Amino acid sequence: MTTDLPGPSQESVRPLLRPGARIFVAGHRGLVGSAVVRRLNDAGHEVITRDRDRLDLRDTARTGAFLREVRPDAVVLAAAKVGGIMANSTYPVQFLEDNLRIQLSVVAGAHAAGVERLLFLGSSCIYPRRAPQPIPESALLTGPLEPTNEAYALAKIAGIVQIRSYRRQYGASYISAMPTNLYGPGDNFDLETSHVLPALIRRFHEARRDGSPAVTLWGSGSPRREFLHVDDLAAACLLLLERYDGEDPVNIGCGEDLTIRELARTISEVTGYQGTVEWDAAKPDGTPRKLLDVSLLTSLGFTPRIALRDGIARTYAWWLEQTAAQV
């Protein structure tokens, strides 16, 4: 694996990210983008955003014109069409094509506008279904993908190759990172399109509210997953912009996992649900295990700060505030 970490002499000549940099965050209203905006603002950077109704990132011409106009010092590409197993299985065309269009528009537009730094955010689903555990960055393209999210994964793999190609052909200081399963304020709680953790929060909350004696969940509960609070992810993104300049993607995670059954038990306790949990084994489990090797990120100085149970409690409280405000 090639990792080109900048030495002290490089940093003294050209800092990877100068103080008070102007940074465009693509996808600033999403789970990841909103957390990145918070972290960059706290660090004293000038954050640039555009709402979707003003700029469709799938539109190459308009995206390129926008980037040439504002000329940011850096771009964080957090915009993406995302969802859980059901959404990926139902809309594979949109998960493939929308993400490809966004990536092509933003990266090519940033290069044409002379943007010096760019961070592309992918997903841990890029790795093979049967990848070694924990998954090293070198596992990319070494085996078949998980069929339930193949279209999304292929789009993200294309983004990694795009970043690598801009580095090799143009010497661009562009990097990519692969976050594990994320959660936190700003998450999607729609049961049709959400990921597993917010979906479980909503399912158990509504079961407690309605007095349901049992909750039936998809699969066997045996797959293992790693979860990282989105504020920890945002801290890792800033760290990478400041310290990393290699062509290989960097895994972002906490280095620990648990079974979906254990996750469900924790969420049921946090939400106060006291009924029983049943499992529908006829529904798909997805990848058996997905734990990232985060040794590279750790070597750069990253340590997650938000424990899972505490993060779930914070996320549940945030969602309750949002739902109360909508009544």
Image (spheres, rainbow, N blue to C red):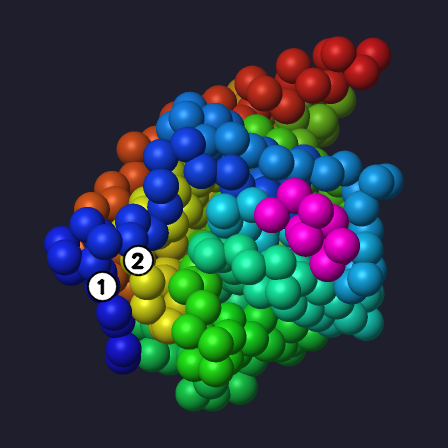
Dot 1 falls on a residue whose secondary structure is loop
- Left or right of 26 on screen, residue 126: left
Q: Which residue is label 2 attached to?
A: 244
User: What's the magenta bit mostly, secondary-structure-wise?
Assistant: helix
- Give 177 or 205, whichever is nearer the viewer: 177
Indicate which disc, 1 or 2, sits on the residue closer to the N terminus: 1
- Give 211 or 100, whichever is nearer the viewer: 100
- Left or right of 164 on screen, residue 247: left
Using a 10 Å C-alpha cutoff, classify the residue at mark 1 as few (fewer than 14 neighbours), some (14 to 19) or many (20 or more): few
Residue 168, relative to residue 242: is it above or below?
below
| Stretch of the chain drawn in magenta | 63-71
Residue 302 visible in the current orientation:
yes
Question: Does the segment drawn in magenta span residue 66?
Answer: yes
Question: Does the segment drawn in magenta span residue 150?
Answer: no
Residue 14, relative to residue 90: is it above or below?
above
Residue 46 point in image, percent of width and height? 51, 31
Q: Which residue is label 1 attached to?
A: 5
Dot 2 falls on a residue whose secondary structure is loop
Residue 277 visible in the current orientation:
no
Q: Amino acid at mark 2?
A: Tyr
Residue 17, relative to residue 38: is it above or below?
below
Residue 195 point in image, percent of width and height? 63, 49
Q: Determine the residue positioned at 41% across, 64% down.
A: 173
**Quarter of the picture holding the C terminus:** top right
Using a 10 Å C-alpha cutoff, classify the residue at mark 2 as few (fewer than 14 neighbours), some (14 to 19) or many (20 or more): many
Report the number of discs: 2
- The reply to whether dot 1 and dot 2 touch (C-beta < 8 Å) is yes
